[in-house]
Image: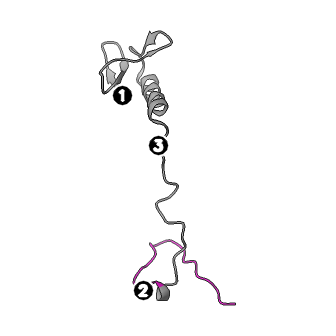
Amino acid sequence: MYDVKPDQVGWTVYNAETDQSPVLDGATLTELEYEAADVLACLLNRRVYGPRQKPLSRWSLMPFMDRRESGTRHPPRGRFIFASVPH
């Protein structure tokens, strides 16, 4: 995993496992501004570990059943209850 740490002039991107700075196109990633070092560390982490899988929502995609059918399960406040309408 890549991270950033301060050096004598600016910030250094380093590998947290080996404590060495990576080399990109022949240049070591040292003496950088913080924003540049942070972006480079994030990009290197994505390249090595892949993008993080984030859930789209913490709520289930299944609609809540009517309270009478679901027993004691109640939807969170501020959410809609989708109940089927008899035909």
Image side of residue 63 versus residue 6, left or right: right
Judge whether 15 appears above or below 80 on screen: above
Q: What residue appears at the point 31 percent right and 27 percent down from the top-left corner? A: 16
Q: Position of residue 52 (x, y in %)?
A: 47, 43
Q: Position of residue 61 (x, y in %)?
A: 54, 66
Q: Position of residue 30 (x, y in %)?
A: 39, 14
Mark 2 or mark 1: whose residue is earlier in sequence: 1
Magenta region: 70-87
Mark 2 or mark 3: whose residue is earlier in sequence: 3
Contact (CB < 8 A) between labels 2 and 3?
no
> Which residue carries the number 1 mark?
3
| Classed neighbour count for the residue bearing mark 3: other residues with Cα under 10 Å, few (<14), some (14–19), many (≥20) | few
| Classed neighbour count for the residue bearing mark 2: other residues with Cα under 10 Å, few (<14), some (14–19), many (≥20) | few
Q: Quadrant of the N terminus?
A: top left
Amino acid type, mark 3: Arg
Colour setup of the view:
one colour
Amino acid type, mark 1: Asp
Q: Residue furthest right?
A: 87
Q: In front: 85, or 5? A: 85
Residues at marks 2 and 1, CA–CA distance in whole angstroms = 49 Å
Secondary structure of the residue carrying tag 2 is: loop
Secondary structure of the residue carrying tag 1 is: strand
> Which residue carries the number 3 mark?
52
Secondary structure of the residue carrying tag 3 is: loop
Q: Is residue 77 magenta?
A: yes
Amino acid type, mark 2: Gly
Q: Is residue 43 magenta?
A: no
Q: Main secondary structure of the magenta part?
A: loop
> Which residue carries the number 2 mark?
71
Q: In front: 79, or 70? A: 70
Residues at marks 3 and 1, CA–CA distance in whole angstroms = 16 Å
